[in-house]
Amino acid sequence: MNMGKPLSSPMLSYQHAYHAGNPADLHKHLVLAGLLTLLTRKTRGISYMETHAGRGLYDLSAPESLKTGEATEGIEAVSLPDCPLKTALDTARKRFGAAAYPGSPLIAQTLLRKQDRLHLMELHPAEYGALRKALRNATTAVHKRDGFEGVLALAPPRPRKGLVLVDPSYEVKTEYAQVTDFTHKLIAKWPEATVMIWYPILPARRHEALINGLKLKYLRHEVSFDLKDGEGMTGSGLVLVNAPYGAEKGLAEAVELAQPVLRL
Ligand SMILES: C[S@@+](CC[C@H](N)C(=O)[O-])C[C@H]1O[C@@H](n2cnc3c(N)ncnc32)[C@H](O)[C@@H]1O
């Protein structure tokens, strides 16, 4: 999944624009939108944090997206019925045009309310600049900072009820162990946080070490899909720590909503 020019760190060569709207995004974003809806059933505000935010807004007619064609095998291959992700997608397309696709930060900003707060970490200079331009407002803070370090430094935020999305690019093998270690440290500082971890399912199955290392209770959800040039990715997985009531039903619904792309 290393498709851009290397910057100072190998981890910053990944650019999500090549993959936006692919089957893995569809899985992650359907579940994320559903979780945010569950967490905002009460009027009290929540905090939403991301360790690896990306640029927040993608253009599926851009050369990067056309080059891989991954969105045609994901979001463009489904007809979403009414659901929280469809609300975020329609809102993005009304504002930014028919080829727009919202990344996780924009999905969250669309579904959250004025009493909620967002803290988004992104280290890549160009991605950070684009994210800040698209999303920064009175309720959304955008940080050019290492995601693991930044979220741990701000935890626990106010409001204390909240969700942390952990979505690294896993270009470097050590990121799997880093996610496990980060999650333990985060829960030690902020025990009630809901944590959503995304991982790719690749032939090397490195995600198993991430999961086997977790010393916490969690829900796990995996789907498989076909992706012509997915560099060996055959599926997408999610781990939810402190999942809110109703999350299991939401995980099952995500697969139904994304037929025929996602399979159990
Ligand atoms: C998979 S993408 C994020 C996609 C986004 N969460 C979404 O679903 O729309 C991972 C992002 O992490 C950024 N990144 C890489 N290393 C980072 C680090 N140490 N801290 C914060 N961001 C980082 C990359 O520049 C990239 O934009």
Image (cartoon, rainbow, N blue to C red):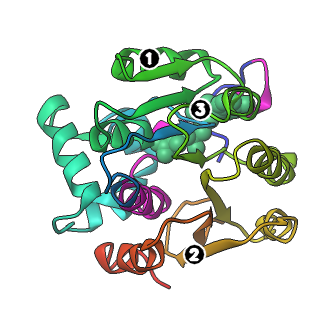
The amino acid type found where label 2 is placed reads: His
Region rendered in magenta: 8-36
Q: Position of residue 111 (x, y in %)?
A: 29, 44
Let me know if residue 38 appears in the view: yes
Secondary structure type for disc 3: loop
Cβ of mark 2 under 8 A from ligand 1: no
The amino acid type found where label 1 is placed reads: Arg
Mark 1 vs 2, N-terminal side = 1
Q: Position of residue 121 (x, y in %)?
A: 60, 27
Q: Position of residue 191 (x, y in %)?
A: 70, 51
Q: Which of the two marks, 2 or 3, is nearer to us in this view? A: 3
Circle 3 sits on which residue?
157
Cβ of mark 1 under 8 A from ligand 1: no
Marks counted in the figure total: 3
Circle 1 sits on which residue?
132
Left or right: where 222 falls relative to 134: right
Alpha-carbon span between mark 1 and mark 3: 20 Å
- Ligand 1 rendered quadrant: top right
Circle 2 sits on which residue?
221
- Asked if 134 appears above or below 54 in the picture, the reply is above
Residue found 54% across the figure and 77% down from its top: 224
- Asked if 73 appears above or below 96 in the picture, the reply is below
Q: Nearer the viewer, residue 44 or 175?
A: 44
Left or right: where 25 falls relative to 58: right
Alpha-carbon span between mark 2 and mark 3: 27 Å
Mark 1 vs 3, N-terminal side = 1
Tell me the crowding category of disc 1: few under 14, some 14 to 19, or many 20 or more residues within 10 angstroms, Cα based.
Answer: many
